[in-house]
């Protein structure tokens, strides 16, 4: 690819509205552009990486015996009414009507559609087991879309569904898929952990999540240093299952006058220990353009915890980043009405929004447009995980399995596998004739991977101050070919053209930077995009029939003779 004929779209400056590094770098490297809240266009460089992630996922699933299908994104409401999820799901399920006033949804996942397919197509036990998958666009009207493609509303998921006649058979496929997921994340070059998980709204019993370890992760996971024990914190803390806890919207509605709710009431509503809201600071937040969430945000301050890292840029009233604030100071700074900063409030999103259990970067309010604070955070020296879902576990606790102690880290959920049992097949009457000629309800498993989220997660783990450092397997290009001042030197141009032809013919994906740009600009762009291997062609080295090779990750440089370049790159 010649960059002069390509859409590079790199940006020098950090975009102001991006919070996490992957979001910043994906914008700066010209991978994605925001269309509207939670909706992104993938630029050519983004598509290249997305397709590579997809390919690895597809290859490993094919190896695991799964078969590819493609289902519609738009689904008719009848199926959702049949499964019961039409009522169960909150506003995350986007519902709409067609011209005939018939109800439809945009698929957030496809259990209903696939179960409907199987009950029509599969009639005999002889056709089982089956494991079908697709790589397809999902839509979830997330309460708080953020971090770019990491928590988008429209995103690319690989979802697979398996069908069986027995638990034993399901367990076998589940184990195969667990292994396939491990292979996928290993091939992607990611540092990940598989953890025991709560199966949440999708239902079922056994479930594992796959997390990429990253400090920006919205989830926390706990694992033992003395055994294979690993769980997400909900499991480790043995909380009531998510389904038994008040849904965020419900909790909010019940506390219509939050200032009047007592600590005990809030604790009961949210199924949490009263001691975890020893002291709560309540401030009114402006609903900002991005936020689809509640108009109130409260910060839970435990004991003597303080706020820190309140960013100053957008907030004319805050002269300096706040490192230590009392209630009175926060009240003054935020302009909150007297009385609205009080000892009692509704702790959102810290505790309510378990899915966004980020214990960081709260937005808190000002009662005045343009004065709200963003990036409010816990003080670093407050034990990081002493709040919310993690209140019952801290690093160093004995592991529930009895071996070793727990380590608690943050993770980005990139995959989730479930044993669904007969939740959908029972409700939708999906059965086949068994060996005895009797109708038997099917047992199901389902298996998701956040294909687009993986790109962001990979960047969270692989970057430096210059930009992205792609793992080879998912780099948009393998080699950056950088001729210096090519437009002033026929010799450089010839060498570059020749190398480009040779490398391309040898099967490499090369980005040939043939723009009329200064070398500094070209180097910076190639570093930012994170292409793993760079070849720089300059006059002086060319005198010796040499070019410079630079490895993006290590920064190591070496000289290669022109004739040997292709062989060296193999
Ligand atoms: P989360 O806890 O992050 O909201 P989830 O548990 O709701 O995710 P699943 O229903 O398990 O998600 O879906 C399977 C996978 O799809 C997730 O493991 C994740 O990688 C991906 N995913 C889910 N929601 C999003 C989103 N809003 N944006 C991008 N990827 C997502
Ligand atoms: Mg989850
Ligand atoms: Mg979710
Ligand atoms: Mg999940």
Image (spheres, helix red, strand yellow):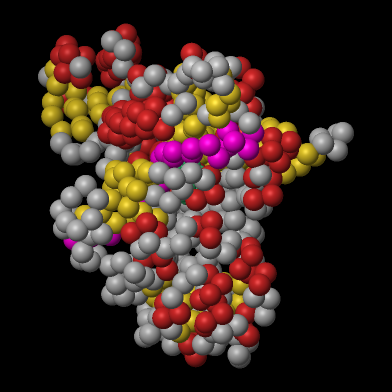
Residue 19: name its quadrant: bottom left
Q: Is residue 479 magenta?
A: no
- Residue sitting at x 22%, y 24%: 539
Q: How many labels does the image show?
A: 0
- Residue sitting at x 44%, y 40%: 418
Q: Where is residue 256 in the image (x, y as percent from the top left)?
A: 68, 76
Quadrant showing the N terminus: top left
Q: Where is residue 470 in the image (x, y as percent from the top left)?
A: 31, 36
Q: Is residue 311 above or below residue 435?
A: below
Q: In this view, does 310 lie to the left or right of 404?
A: right
Q: Is residue 123 above or below residue 555?
A: above
Which is more toward the observer, 218 or 247?
Answer: 247
**What residue occupies the far front of the structure in this picture?**
436
For the record, the magenta segment spans 405-428
Main secondary-structure element of the magenta-colored stretch:
strand
Q: Where is residue 236 in the image (x, y as percent from the top left)?
A: 33, 59
Quadrant showing the C terminus: top left
Q: Where is residue 533 in the image (x, y as percent from the top left)?
A: 25, 29
Residue 549 makes an appearance in the image: yes
- Residue sitting at x 56%, y 80%: 265
Q: In this view, does 452 lie above or below 320?
A: above
Residue 484 makes an appearance in the image: no
Q: Is residue 139 left or right of residue 189?
A: right
Which is more toward the observer, 533 or 183?
Answer: 183
- Residue sitting at x 57%, y 64%: 246
Q: Is residue 165 left or right of residue 289?
A: left
Q: Is residue 540 above or below residue 89?
A: above
Q: Is residue 390 left or right of residue 86?
A: left
């Amino acid at each position: 690819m010649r960059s002069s004929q390509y859409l590079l779209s790199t940006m020098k400056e950090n975009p102001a509205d991006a919070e996490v590094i992957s979001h910043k770098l994906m914008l700066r490297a010209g991978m994605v552009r925001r269309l509207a809240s939670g909706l992104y266009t993938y630029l050519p460089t983004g598509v290249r990486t997305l397709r590579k992630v997809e390919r690895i996922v597809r290859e490993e699933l094919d190896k695991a015996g799964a078969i590819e299908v493609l289902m519609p994104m738009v689904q008719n409401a009848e199926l959702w009414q049949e499964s019961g999820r039409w009522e169960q799901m909150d506003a995350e399920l986007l519902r709409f009507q067609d011209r005939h006033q018939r109800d439809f949804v945009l698929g957030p996942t496809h259990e209903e559609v696939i179960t409907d397919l199987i009950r029509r197509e599969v009639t005999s036990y002889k056709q089982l087991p089956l494991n079908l998958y697709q790589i397809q666009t999902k839509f979830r009207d997330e309460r708080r879309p953020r971090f770019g493609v990491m928590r988008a509303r429209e995103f690319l998921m690989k979802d697979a569904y398996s069908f069986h006649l027995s638990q034993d058979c399901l367990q076998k496929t589940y184990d195969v898929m667990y292994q396939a997921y491990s292979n996928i994340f290993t091939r992607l070059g990611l540092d990940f952990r598989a953890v025991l998980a709560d199966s949440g709204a999708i239902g079922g019993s056994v479930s594992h999540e796959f997390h990429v370890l990253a400090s920006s992760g919205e989830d926390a996971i706990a694992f033992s240093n003395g055994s294979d024990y690993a769980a997400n914190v909900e499991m480790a803390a043995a909380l009531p299952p998510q389904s038994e806890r008040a849904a965020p919207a419900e909790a909010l509605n019940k506390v219509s006058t939050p200032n009047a709710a007592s600590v005990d009431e809030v604790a009961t509503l949210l199924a949490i220990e009263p001691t975890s809201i020893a002291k709560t600071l309540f401030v009114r937040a402006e609903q900002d353009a991005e936020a689809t969430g509640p108009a109130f945000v409260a910060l839970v301050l435990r004991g003597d915890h303080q706020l820190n890292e309140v960013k100053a840029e957008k907030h004319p009233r805050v002269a300096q980043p706040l490192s230590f604030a009392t209630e009175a100071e926060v009240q003054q700074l935020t302009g909150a009405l007297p009385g609205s900063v009080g000892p009692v409030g509704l702790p959102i999103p810290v505790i309510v929004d378990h899915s966004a259990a980020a214990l960081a970067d709260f937005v808190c309010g000002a009662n005045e447009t343009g004065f709200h604070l963003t990036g409010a955070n816990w003080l670093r020296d407050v034990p990081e995980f002493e709040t919310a879902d993690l209140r019952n576990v801290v690093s160093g606790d004995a592991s529930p399995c009895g071996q070793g102690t727990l380590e608690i880290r943050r993770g980005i959920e990139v995959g989730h596998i479930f044993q669904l049992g007969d939740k959908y097949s029972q409700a939708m009457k999906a059965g086949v004739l068994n060996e005895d000629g009797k109708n038997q309800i099917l047992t199901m498993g389902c298996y998701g991977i956040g294909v687009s989220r993986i790109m962001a997660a990979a960047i969270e783990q692989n970057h430096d101050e210059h930009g992205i450092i792609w793992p080879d397997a998912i780099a948009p290009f393998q080699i950056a070919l950088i001729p210096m001042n090519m437009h002033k030197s026929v010799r450089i141009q010839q060498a570059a053209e020749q190398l480009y032809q040779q490398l391309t013919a040898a099967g490499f994906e090369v980005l040939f930077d043939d723009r009329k740009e200064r070398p500094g600009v070209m180097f910076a762009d190639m570093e930012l995009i994170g292409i793993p291997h760079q070849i720089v062609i300059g006059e002086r080295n060319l005198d010796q029939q040499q070019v410079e090779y630079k490895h993006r990750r290590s920064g190591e440089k070496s000289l290669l003779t022109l004739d040997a370049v292709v062989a060296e790159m193999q």
